[in-house]
Each structure stands twice: as C-alpha cells, then as structure tokens.
Image (tube, helix red, strand yellow):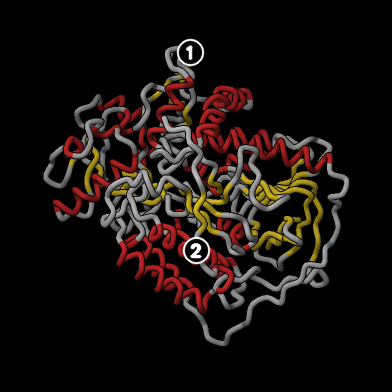
Amino acid sequence: MNTDPIPNQPLLRPWSSWTPRYLTAISPKQFGHYFTDVLIIGGGLAGLRAAHEIHPSLRTLILTKDKLEESNSTYAQGGIASVWDPEDRFDNHVADTLIAGGDLCDNKVVETVVREAPDRVAELIRWGTRFDQHDGQIKLGREGGHSHQRILHALGDATGKEIMRAMIAHTRQQPHTEISEETFTLDLLTMEGRCHGAIASIRGGKPVFIWAKETILCTGGCGQVFRESTNPRVATGDGHAIAFRAGARMRDMEFMQFHPTVLYIAGSSRTLITEAVRGDGAYLIDANGTRFMGEYDERLELAPRDIVSQAIVSQMEKTQSPCVYLTMKHLDPTHVRERFPGIAKVCGSFGLDIAVDAIPVRPGAHYMIGGCEVDTQARTSIPGLWAAGEVTSSGLHGANRLASNSLLEGLVYGAIAGRNASECASQNPSNELRVLPIESPGLARSDQEIDLADIRNAVRSLMWRNVGVKRKEERLSETIQTIQQYCSYVLSQNLDGIEGWELQNILTVSLQMAVAAQERKESRGVHFRIDYPAVDKTHWRKHLTISRTG
C-alpha cells in the first residue's frame, strides 16, 4: 500500500467575489444572545457522540435543524463496520478501506478509525443499542468491498434508526446538555480568524447570537444538491456552506458517492435499498433479465459502490432503460422478508413482493466524501472550530467510501472532536464568553420576487445530469456557467427564511463540487470522467482544496 504523503492542490479562484460572508445582517445590538461553553451544530450520530465527551462542568448546546430523528444517521440502513469476528483482523479492515479509497486515503486516519471501532461499538451496546443476534451472538454481515463478515446490523435494515434511538435517549439524560431542535444555523461567527459560535434562527424566529468557547460542526451531508438522492429533505449542505463562508478550507468536493441501488418508482420518494441486500445474495439484472455485473467486475454485485454505480448507468444506457432491477427470487423467501422488513414494507406499498418481484433501482447521491478539512484531532483550519462526520474530509474514505464506514467515522471522530473541544474549553482562560463587535451590513433586498422552488429544482436537475455518476468537460463547464448565473442574483439578496437560506447553501456547495470535478482530469473512485477514464497516478494523486479567502 502507498504510504507517501498526499499533497494538497489549492483551487485558485476569486471565491470571495461571488459569495457573501454572512447571509443576514449581523449586529450585536439588534439580536438576542445566548452563551454556552461548547456549541455542537448538528444532532446526528457524530454530534451526539461528541456531546458525550464534554466534561459535565461545561454547558453544552446542540442545535439541530429538524427533530433529532431527522438525520442521515437515522436513515442509514446498511450497518456499522467493525472487526468483531475473531477470524477477522484490523489489517484486513484497513486494507479493504484503502483499496476502496482509490489510493487517496490517509493511512494514519484509517488505522485510527479501524482500531477504535470495537470500543465505539461496545459503547453503543452499553448505551442501549440492540444489534441483531443469532443464538446469543451478534450477527455479522458482509457488504461490497469487505473481505470478511464485519457488518453489525440492527432491526434488519434499520441500523441507523436503532443506534440513534439509543443515542438520543442517552443524550437526553445528560444534565449539562441542552438540545435545541428546529433550529437553523445561518452562519458561524468569526473574528480575527477565530470561531466564536454561530448565528441561528429558532423555529423560524429572528436570528440570535450563540456565543461559545468552542464549536463543533456535525451537520451531515448534502445529497439534496442532486435530484436523485437517498438523503432526507434536510440534507442541503448547510454545514459545508457555512464552513466555506467562514473561511474554512474545503477538500475533496468532487467526491460525492452515489449509492448504486435506490428504489426507482415514478412519483415516489427515493428510498435506499441497502447494500446488505446484495450482501445477502441479490442479483442485479437489466431490463432484459440479464445478470450483467460479470461484464464489469469479477466481484459481481459485491464490487465497491463506485464500480457498481458506473456499471448500472452503463447498462441503463446500453438497454435504453431508466433503471435496472434487484432480484432475490432465487433466495429463501421467508429469510428475505424477515431480513429486510423495512424494504419489504416500502416495496409492498407499491405492490412489490421483494421475495418474488424484481425491484427497480438506479443510483442516487448518497454520501458526501468531501467537506471541511480536519486533521487527526478533528481540528479545522479555523481555530475554535472542530468538525466530525459527513460534513468533513478526514482522509478516511479517500476517493470512495467503503460500505458501512460512515457511522463508524461519526462515532470515532465525534468522540475525538468532543474530547478536544472539551479540553480546550476547560483549559483556555483567555477564551472568555462575551459579546464581540462582529458587524455585517447584510445583503440587499430586492423588489423582484424569486421563485425559490423553481431554481432549486433546476439546480438539482442540472447537478444530476452533469455532475452525477458520469462527468465530462463540456457538461461541467455548462454547469459552472449556469450556477454562476444563479449565484449572481440569488447570493446577493437577503432571503429571509429557511427555504431561501437552503437555496443559497445549495448553490454555494454545487459550485464548489462542479469546479472541483472539472479540475480533476482523471477518474478516481466515485469521480468518473468520460473524457479522462483512467487513474492518473503521476499528476492527480493529490487533494483539491478550496477556501473563500485563499
């Protein structure tokens, strides 16, 4: 395995010329103020795990955009990866992660996360998580890219739901931790290069200043940037956008992982069909009933997600069909229905019996690998700001995330971020809680009404067509030009309300993704360029970084 350091390549563009620093006017004299020792933005698994590391003597405030249950963590079906079987080894999990990552992983980070996994899983069990068992032992599954059975599941195909149930209950028992649900974070508050908290709107009310000694960003992903996505409605890239506006260094923004199998029924919401279905032996067939994965990879349906997604899109093009199909009719029907009760229920609502009928699927945006760059201690490039989970680029996933490593990353890095933020908040006497003279005039108000929903739909469709599974120069250029046009008038206006702020964040993240995708002139991991189909180990084994200020 390659252990050479991976350099950063900055994207030198005048980013500050098109994006505002703050989405709303900032004036300490006009807004209310709240003070806390540690502020955690995001109530998914990474945020809740971080909260458990904060010393009880410190006040902790968790902001979550919706209810605590509405996060990518809750919707995770597949499971959590950990070396649990005595026949498995840490080295095996490390090797599988590095292979899937397209030679762009940080070896040290991979080692740390993999070796901490059993302890973090044991914590979940102590805190009340009930993983699936057989004869008194935890059942282990296998998913694409894994060499051993090491995937722990809960409730069959609702692992995230069960983990979050236990974590939410455990977090609510912490007397020093306050949770503010339905709170939209507009921006981070920075002064002289340091983060001092955030400005947020509680239940759609007037924004308030939240001052904190240390801030931890755990806002999750940005799948809603694309028309086809497994992510919940709230995953609009808010954390990626506010970190960028605050001047944080963003990295690997071209790497969005597309899940190969998303239920595709016209007019319905897109539902993930977990990797574990293929792990249990499901076949992928095309519109003609042909099992096609053998044409693309010898690992068949258990190839890594990037390969399966690209194969599905190619087969759809070859057969001129809008989808392919998963079939489990060759498997024991009782086992299939018991193993995947959630999927069986969803498909059943459309008249499909998963044990008998072919399930129509196609890829969808699933997991954002890129994000706010963090080091091994969960530090961002902004002092006072830590980050964990899907909003970050930690180096664990490289160019392609190995299945079921995402919940694991949230646990490990959430713990690291919480531990370090707690220590800094406790030991830094100069970091006092006080109102700072941070001022911003805000954006202009326009008399011209903007159809926010129309622009949002247009951007998401554009990103899906041109920055989806397959990419090429002309389409990326078209995307960048179009998004810049939208930015020229949408990002220059004061759009009061969550719908407007979300659109501004979607545009901010979309442009970064499109520019980074255009810049990387090779194919690596989840980033596939039709015009540059090969991996370029000589010129492109490096990370692309973007910052508003540099």
The x, y position of residue 36, in whole percent, is 80, 50
Question: What is the distance, in whole Å, between disc 1 and disc 2 at their CAs?
Answer: 46 Å
Q: Is residue 271 left or right of residue 327?
A: right
* Residue 70 seen in render: no
Which mark is nearer the camera, 1 or 2?
2
Disc 1 is placed on an element classified as loop
Q: List the residue tagged with mark 2.
A: 506
Which residue is located at x 61 percent, y 76 percent?
494
**How many C-alpha atoms fall within 10 Å of the one at disc 1: few (<14), some, or many (≥20)?**
few
| Quarter of the rendering containing residue 466 | bottom left
Q: Amino acid at mark 1?
A: Gly
| 300 to the left or right of 83 | left
Q: Residue furthest bottom?
A: 447
Q: Position of residue 472 (x, y in %)?
A: 30, 60
Question: Which image quadrant is residue 96 in?
Answer: top left
Q: Quadrant where the N terminus lies?
A: top left
Check disc 1 and report the residue beneath it: 136
